[in-house]
Image (tube, grey):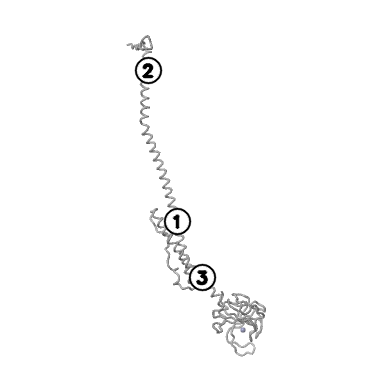
Amino acid sequence: MQIILVSRARKLPKTLDLANRRVRWKLLSMVTLAVLGCMSAGVVLALMVASPRDRALTEIRGLQQQIRQQDTQLSGVRQDAQRGLDALAVKLGQLQAQSTRLNALGERLAQVGKLDAGEFNFDQQPPVGGVEDVGGAAYALPSTLDSSINQLASQFDLQQAQLSALQSLLLDAKIESNLKPTGMPVPGYISSYFGVRPDPFDGHSARHTGIDIATPFGTAVHAVAEGMVTFAGVRSGYGNVIEIDHGNGYMTRYAHNSALEVHPGQHVQVGDVIAKAGSTGRSTGSHVHFEVWYDGRVVNPLAFARNHR
Ligand SMILES: [Zn+2]
């Protein structure tokens, strides 16, 4: 078989002799190349047609990845928030416990101060035991916490007001106690007690209106309570004497002093030095004769002298 190729470019037609082995090979390879060329064009075309869908799929996969990441972040945030709320709940519980302790302290103070319990509500039980169990409903917690915190805040306000009132009452009580004769006017031992005793000078039975505290000559004599000096001078038998009015029915007298350190009308505080011990007046040796008067009557000073402030 012969194939005759006729071309305008060529003057002579080209003859392909299929019987020729070389020509057959040449032709076969040309046909193969043409088929291969068509196939690659098809593949490229197919790829060009399919690419928008692929791009969309890729985008979706990307979005899904992003969503997964955001979901992970969100659960992280949720965990953090929950941890924060848990920490707040613990803190709130601690504050409530503190409030309870404060109440107990207030109650004890009211008892110690012997104050009218009716004025204080310290026995009113505050809520205890921390916040309510909300059963893991993480988003119900904030409102519970909020109301608990508000409740606690008003509780603290109330307690603060009550404690200030209590404090001022206790301070008043302390001022009161400063006016009450308490303790010994000088260090020393009691050489003679209050009551009937043989008179140290004539041996007759006599009523001793105070206690005698033996103490070295010149020892500082202290006021046993706050008050106003009403007398500083010599009284018959008492020698150099100081008298202090404490303004609450109590009066104290300190006798036989060697020197007087205060003057009438002077205001003295607890522990102020008012005189120096001595043996003036009817006295057998250096001592302080100490008297306590209440509402115009002389009383046994021993109980006062043995008290401590
Ligand atoms: Zn005496």
Vertical placement of residue 248 versus 135, above or below: below
Query: Image quadrant of ligand 1?
Result: bottom right
Residue type pointed to by label 2: Met
Callout 2: helix, strand or loop? helix
Q: Earlier in the sequence, mark 2 or mark 3?
A: 2
User: Which of the two discs, 2 and 3, sits closer to the camera?
Assistant: 3
- In the rendered image, residue 257, in percent from the top left (x then y), is placed at 65, 81
Q: Earlier in the sequence, mark 1 or mark 3?
A: 1
Which residue was labeled with disc 2? 30
Residue 269 quadrant: bottom right
Residue 290 quadrant: bottom right
Residue type pointed to by label 3: Ser
For this rendering, which residue is in front, 110 or 260?
260
Looking at the image, residue 32 sits to the left or right of residue 156; the answer is left
Residue 231 quadrant: bottom right
Which residue was labeled with disc 1? 88
